[in-house]
Image: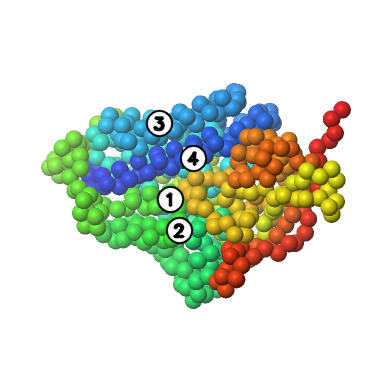
Amino acid sequence: MEWTAWLDAPEYEFARQVLQRGVATLYFVAFLSSLNQFPALLGERGLLPVPDFLAGSNRLRRPTLFSWRYSDRLLRAVCWGGMAIAASLVFGLPQLGPPWVPLLAFLALWLLYMSIVNVGQTFYGFGWEMLLLEAGFTVAFLGSDQTPPPRTILILLAWLVFRLEFGAGMIKIRGGREWRDLTALYYHHETQPMPGPLSRQAHLLPKAWHRMEVLGNHFAQLVVPFFLFAPQPLASVAAGIIVFTQLWLVASGNFAWLNWMAILLAFAAVSDPVAHAVIPAIPLDWHSEAWGAGAPAGVGSQAPVAWLVVLLFGTVLLLVLSYRPIENLLSHYQLMNAAFNRWQLVNAYGAFGTVTKQRIEIAVEGTLAAEPDDTAEWREYGFRGKPGDVRRVPRQWAPYHLRLDWLMWFLPLRTVHERWFYAFLAKLLEADRPTLRLLRMDPFDGERPRWVRVRSYLYRFSTRAEFRETGQRWIRIPLHESIPPLSLPPDD
């Protein structure tokens, strides 16, 4: 079938290898994160128990394996199964077989993780959850080592990068004034949800540098994405710019797998000749003998006919579903991180339309005293990722996702009076071991406190002079008591 010859993109084998193995790696991290945190947050005895959620009237709006039954044991089985499948893809084992083998492997990852996300409630309400789902579904159609990379799927992956980058750029232009007057980075490194070890150094850079950062961001998100669809080597250059800017975000913050996914997806636009020119160790021939890349031009695709039918089905499906995201990008009322169908495919993305100007941190304290008066000794709980100890260097966690710490950042922006947070305080009063394992430090070493309270602080990075004088990386100022002392009701 000569008309199918254009479907083959033999010059993008390196891109396929990076996309399949990289996306599978992020699925492994996502399942590992859920294995370690989901039972304490959402399990049978979690802060927002899934069985209670499933008993609600709106529980079946989105598909999940847990709609029939949830148990922590089943959740762990799903996580372990997902990690095993993801690991096999990282090592390239399914890719050695026919193209339907990696297809089924990625679709299994998509379905298993979607089952978790769709019962994850507020702890899974992040844009990178749907990004991982969409990426996994799309990458599933890249085939195996026995077939050439499919051009239509590579274009659709570039379209995903375009929506991710251009959507974020438009959200910023339509959002806070700080993005238009180039002052957003005066604040962002300090007030972002979870700073990394280099965030303070980035914040202390000159304001002229921060203005250049914003200009570079606008260029990378509003101009560069269009060149992903240009002829080579322009498309590869555009991908390289996106990779570079995303690596800066990786170095200066902790955004789970968002930035890593953008880096991986950008490789959909990198051709083998360009990759070989940059890194000569990358071969140019790859699997040419296996799938007949050296066949004469005009003889049609070298992939099996049945596989071509599957490819065309996946291509048409994703193209049809692209209507709503295109409409959203053109709208003055652009939605950010929105899914337009129950399968979370071809979504709208974007982040930080406005930048928080001050950092308010929620501190949780407990005491063993019988009465929470002025004589009580209050001890503060330590979190793994969110700022607390003013001398502690922020850790690098991405692409691993600390869900409790991220939700703690949202509390002062919304309200501390959220149901899950009061459930969290009750678990601390019970000295619940699964909950305490989510923390970096329990000041009571497993003993039950008599009282807990919540206080708010204003945090800012210390200047270089302040750090030399005090050794503190953060300066914090007490604001108020957000929740007065609470205790468990007395036993009958």
Where is residue 108? Give x, y as percent: 43, 30
Q: Amino acid at mark 4?
A: Ala
How far is mark 1 from mark 4, CA to CA? 12 Å
The answer to whether residue 464 shows anywhere in this view is yes
Is residue 388 left or right of 456 when viewed as pictured? left
Badge 2 or badge 4: first in the primary sequence: 4
Q: Amino acid at mark 3?
A: Ile
Please give the name of the residue rendered at 56% of the width and 45% of the height, measured from the top-left corner: 402
The residue furthest left is: 296
Residue on which disc 1 sits: 260
Task: Give the colour scheme of this rendering.
Answer: rainbow
Query: Marks 1 and 4: CB-CB under 8 Å?
Result: no
Disc 3: CA contacts within 10 A as few (<14), some (14-19) or many (>=20): many
Residue on which disc 3 sits: 85
Dividing the image into 4 quarters, which one contains the N terminus? top left
Number of the front mark, 2 or 3 = 2
SS for callout 2: helix
Q: Quadrant of residue 418?
A: top right
Is residue 202 left or right of 93 when viewed as pictured? right
The answer to whether residue 57 shows anywhere in this view is no
SS for callout 4: helix
Badge 2 or badge 3: first in the primary sequence: 3
Q: Which mark is residue 30?
A: 4
Please give the name of the residue rendered at 56% of the width and 25% of the height, measured from the top-left corner: 73
Where is residue 60? Give x, y as percent: 61, 31
Between 302 and 202, the one lying in front of the other is: 202
Is residue 177 left or right of 418 when viewed as pictured? left
Between 58 and 87, the one lying in front of the other is: 87
